[in-house]
Amino acid sequence: MRYSEIGLKSKRVRPRMEARLVENLKSTFLHSGISFSGIEVVRGRIIVRTRSERAEEAASRVFGVKSASHAVEVPAEMEAIEKAARAVAREGEGSFAVRARRLTKDLPINSQEIARIVGAAIREETGRPVDLSNPDQVIGIEVIGGRAYVFDSRVEGPGGLPLGTQGTAVALISGGIDSPVAAWLMMRRGVEILPLHMKVGDRSEESFYRVLRVLREYSRGGERDPTVLDHAETMTQVTSALAEVGELSWTCLFCKRAMLKAAEEVARARGAEAIVTGESLGQVASQTLANMSVISRGLELPVLRPLIGMDKEEIVSVAKRIGTYQVYERPPPCPFRPKRVITSARWDKFVEVARKSGLHHLLSP
């Protein structure tokens, strides 16, 4: 397995991230029922000794992994490398190319010369044509620390940083399209997620748990128990109070403020350092810059909005790629949404409405 971003870290930070990545890989393999005899880090590569054909796919869900290849390990000697490469070539057909990389100088010849010699041997044995631009089979060779690895597969991973290296955050997850993607993107940056669902009905809770099962496939080594709170009861009280003073157009802002306050309480109780939401600027009427400023004002914890600059198509594309879109079920219309929604909220007006409706408890930090 290869990583990219971890390799940019300092000599002090990199070993810690590599160690966490190894632990997360172990958790993923154990959960997937994949047996292995050892894992080691060698020159920016992580070597897992296993005979499982499912190891590549499992590794592709681990944050920090850029790509994975199921390879044959041989001594870093040309005769052994040629033999292994010819065996791999026999499994393919059509045109081929050899890509070699010498990460350590165990051989007296460079990477291009290794590829040329091995390519010539394969062509002589199989008669297959060489195509360096668009080959049907790419045979890779990497020389590392006295050993060589020969392969013809490469599965892309999510990249990013190992889960658990960048702290913990409470993620508000609805079970829709946006918030699971927001949680996944923060996980990709190494943040452990404490899932929080604000329940407004049985269907919303069922959708939340479907999404959570998908996200957990990416969170081995950093799974946290979810929290589910009854938001319908809270919103019944909020809408009743706003209706009494004729301010129902503020419902969406008080709804989101109540969610953030609840998330902050959960974060304090469980030691999290931030809150994550699935808001995207201007996507719906309530998600304006003015409204976001008001609903998060005065909170003790930062509110992270990883989707803030993404449009719906971009978000859906990520959701499809990670698998949360496939379990999405369109929710019923929000029973609390007013006919008119405030889009340019001001803090002084929000405070005024809160006080006259008896919702001033949502103002306190």
Image (tube, grey):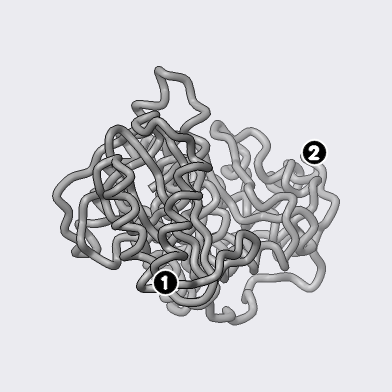
Label 1: which secondary element: helix
Residue at 48 percent of width and 74 percent of height: 204
Q: For mark 2, does the 10 Å Cα neighbourhood hold few (<14), some (14 to 19), or many (20 or more) residues? A: few
Quadrant in the picture for residue 254: bottom right
Looking at numbered disc 2 in the image, what kind of residue is underneath it? Asp
Compare residues 109 and 300 and report the one nearer the observer: 109
Q: Is residue 196 visible?
A: no
Image side of residue 163 versus residue 312, left or right: left
Specify the quadrant that holds the C terminus. Answer: top right
Q: Is residue 95 visible?
A: yes
Q: Which residue is mark 2?
A: 348
Quadrant in the picture for residue 209: bottom left
Looking at numbered disc 1 in the image, what kind of residue is underneath it? Thr
Front: mark 1 or 2? 1
- Residue 218, image x, y percentages: 39, 57
Q: Earlier in the sequence, mark 1 or mark 2?
A: 1
Where 279 sits versus 272, above or below? below
Compare residues 235 and 17 and report the one nearer the observer: 17
Compare residues 10 and 126 and report the one nearer the observer: 126
- Residue 136, image x, y percentages: 54, 71
Image side of residue 346 versus residue 68, left or right: right
- Residue 108, image x, y percentages: 40, 30
Residue at 23 percent of width and 43 percent of height: 39
Image side of residue 231 versus residue 348, left or right: left
Q: CA distance from mark 1 to mark 2?
A: 78 Å
Mark drawn on residue 343: none
- Residue 312, image x, y percentages: 72, 66
Where 8 sits versus 197, above or below? above
Q: Which residue is mark 1?
A: 126
